[in-house]
Image (spheres, rainbow, N blue to C red):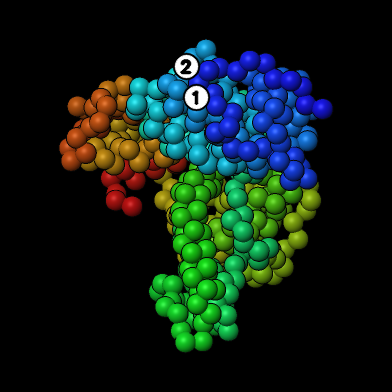
Amino acid sequence: ALAKAPKLPSWLDLSLLAPLRLVNRERLAESATAAVVGALCASAPDQAYAGFEAQKELLDETTLDELAWSLFRAWSFAGAPSKDAWAFMALAHAGGDRCVARLSPLVAVWPNDGLAARAQTGVEILGTIGTDGALIALHRFSQKAKTKGLKSAALEKMEEIAESRGLTADELADRLVPDLGLDDAGTLELDLGERSLTVGFDEHLVPFLRDEGARLPSFPKASKTDDAAKHKEAKSRFAQLQKEVKEVAKHVLARLENAMAAGRGWPADVAESCFFGHPLMRHLAGRVAWLATVDDAPVGYFRVSEDGTLATSSDDAFELPSSAYVRLMHPARDPADELARFAGLFGDYGVIQPFAQLSRPVLVSGATERGAQSTRFQHRKVPTKRLFSLEHRGWTRTGRGRSSKSIGDATATLRYAPGFDGVPDLEGEQDLGLLTLDGATFEELDVVVCSELLYDVERSFVTE
């Protein structure tokens, strides 16, 4: 039986909370709901009250999720009294993905509303909920949060969770890409009645539709033979997919390119589950060229065919060893003849790459790089708004006129003037200064690391 609840705060009216149900869908009496709320009241911020875990096993997850949210809302409407912050933390112990979807937008805006501390607590709550949806939200904040405090708090929480699983934050993020309801072949059939539309994805994961193989410019109007209700449902489903994939795409595209630039790879089984066989990521995996190594020695270069099988640059079947380690090929390190063959093959098949890989510029240190200093970009002007693109590639503003990036055990710093604080004049220009290293010299850098570091800055001069 559920334990009797302790006395609850005067602002809380149990009759206004979302109703709770048992797993058999039987509705709980208000006295039993009071016991559940009391257990949440007795819970510590980082650990639920022991009795609550026993209660939770008896309760329907969806209604418990709704109860947690209604409890949080009641606390908010009461002025969010700090002595009753347990009602906020109840989201961590009783909330699920519905709470995540509602809480995340609030966490994003709280810092701008003078509620930075509440946003930090929101990060802790998302970490405790721990569902894939919660971790995806945390990863989004760690990459795209508008305030430095929220961004760093989310990154710290992601790293903490990843470490507890023996992973890096990026490795954890690789495993969190949703399938968005696609089938194993990475497609979705939208039923209109007498006909159906097939969803496909382009090189930037923008979804499109095909009708009997013909690509459509947009969702078609209902025909006389279409079922009106099914057409409406299919149109709504496609619109929802467009919205969902837009948010996912910008993160996975950047992470995949950054993995190539950093030489980050994956064990064969992880590459298979996270890329080659993943319903969404397979659409990117088939547009890039891969390298497999065993004990650091190359054992094959391959691509992922449309049917999910692996093939060499000569279009022969390739069998990936189970002990292999897989990474994306890079022109600064991998054989030019293999890169050229893949480029020709992709051209023949009309495969467009999601970012510059096979055609990626290779920049090497030269006369402008001496020791830990580079004058390559000195006195060149770049639009201020283009410097923001550096942040998508791992750079962080570390002062009014400088940005830095960690590269292994070293740190690169780019200086520019006049610099900016807060919100800059996006129409202005910056005069670039020295690019310096702390912890290494340019001569000591790996060829890919050096090329990517220089390319980071060089591409700031080009509108992409």
Tell me the quarter of the picture where residue 117 sits. top left
According to the picture, the residue beneath numbered tag 1 turns out to be 75
- Describe the element under mark 2 as helix, strand or loop: loop
User: Disc 2 residue type?
Assistant: Pro
Q: Residue at x 47, y 49 (%)?
A: 247
Q: Is residue 379 above or below residue 88?
A: below
**403 or 292: nearer the eye?**
403
User: Disc 1 residue type?
Assistant: Trp
Q: Is residue 332 above or below residue 105?
A: below
Q: Is residue 447 visible?
A: no
**458 or 22: nearer the eye?**
22
**250 or 12: nearer the eye?**
12
Question: How far across and how far down the image is residue 40, in percent?
Answer: 65, 22
Tell me the quarter of the picture where residue 129 sits. top right
Question: How far across and how far down the image is residue 102, in percent?
Answer: 50, 39
Question: How far across and how far down the image is residue 65, in percent?
Answer: 62, 37
In terms of sequence position, does the residue under pointer 1 or pointer 2 come before the other?
1
Q: Quadrant of the N terminus?
A: top right
46 lies left or right of 433: right
**199 or 285: nearer the eye?**
199
Q: Residue furthest bottom?
A: 224
Q: Residue at x 76, y 61 (%)?
A: 319
Question: How far across and how far down the image is residue 105, in percent?
Answer: 45, 38
Q: Is residue 432 visible?
A: yes
Tell me the quarter of the picture where residue 52 sits. top right
According to the picture, the residue beneath numbered tag 2 turns out to be 81
| Pointer 1 with pointer 2, Cβ within 8 A | yes
